[in-house]
Amino acid sequence: MRELFVIKDTQPNQISYFHLLLLMASLPFDIFYSHLILISLFLHTLIHFKKNEVKPLFKPGVLIVQSVFFISLLSTIYTINLSGAFNELGRLVTILLF
């Protein structure tokens, strides 16, 4: 069981791994904690950002997944229930970030 939580990689990758583990563990609970962990992961990623690793992100598959967020963002203009639309956008923003 202990081998499940131990990875042999660089220290920044280990920290990112534990951020993702904490994020998955916090999802069933209050949304505040999951957003806090997600912001922490985002800041950690910005600190260890390497420009040469960005090129593989702009593939058609990734852009198709992110298009769900952009379609939802454009469709909030036509909705009657703005509070419900903003709640849905709050949930879908993780698609854009990941």
Image: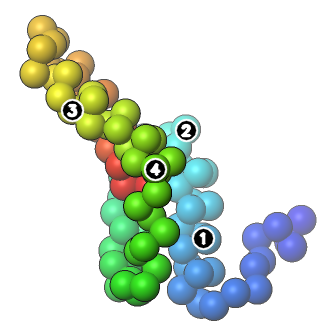
Instruction: Name the residue beneath numbered marker 2.
Output: 28
In the image, which is nearer the foreground, mark 2 or mark 1?
A: 1
Counting other residues with Cα less than 10 Å from the Cα at mark 4, is it few (<14), some (14-19), or many (20 or more)? Answer: few
Q: Position of residue 53 (x, y in %)?
A: 46, 79
Instruction: Name the residue beneath numbered marker 1.
Output: 18
Q: Position of residue 38 (x, y in %)?
A: 40, 59
Q: Secondary structure at mark 2?
A: loop
Rendered image quadrant of residue 40: bottom left
In the visual, does 86 lie left or right of 55?
left
Circle nearer the N terminus (3, 1): 1
In the image, which is nearer the foreground, mark 3 or mark 2?
A: 3
Q: Work out whether 96 lies above or below 73.
A: below
- Say what amino acid the circle numbered 2 marks: Pro
Specify the quadrant that holds the C terminus: bottom left
Q: Position of residue 14 (x, y in %)?
A: 62, 80
In the image, which is nearer the foreground, mark 3 or mark 4?
A: 4
Q: Secondary structure at mark 1?
A: helix
Separation of marks 1 and 4 at Cα, in angstroms:
29 Å
Instruction: Name the residue beneath numbered marker 4.
Output: 60
Q: Which residue is painted at 54% across and 74% down in the image?
A: 16
Counting other residues with Cα less than 10 Å from the Cα at mark 2, is it few (<14), some (14-19), or many (20 or more)? Answer: few
Q: Which residue is painted at 43% across and 85% down in the image?
A: 52
Specify the quadrant that holds the N terminus: bottom right
Circle nearer the N terminus (1, 4): 1
Q: Work out whether 50 lies above or below 45.
A: below
Instruction: Name the residue beneath numbered marker 3.
Output: 73
Q: Work out whether 27 lies above or below 47.
A: above
Q: Which residue is painted at 42% across and 68% down in the image?
A: 41
In the visual, does 90 lie left or right of 29?
left
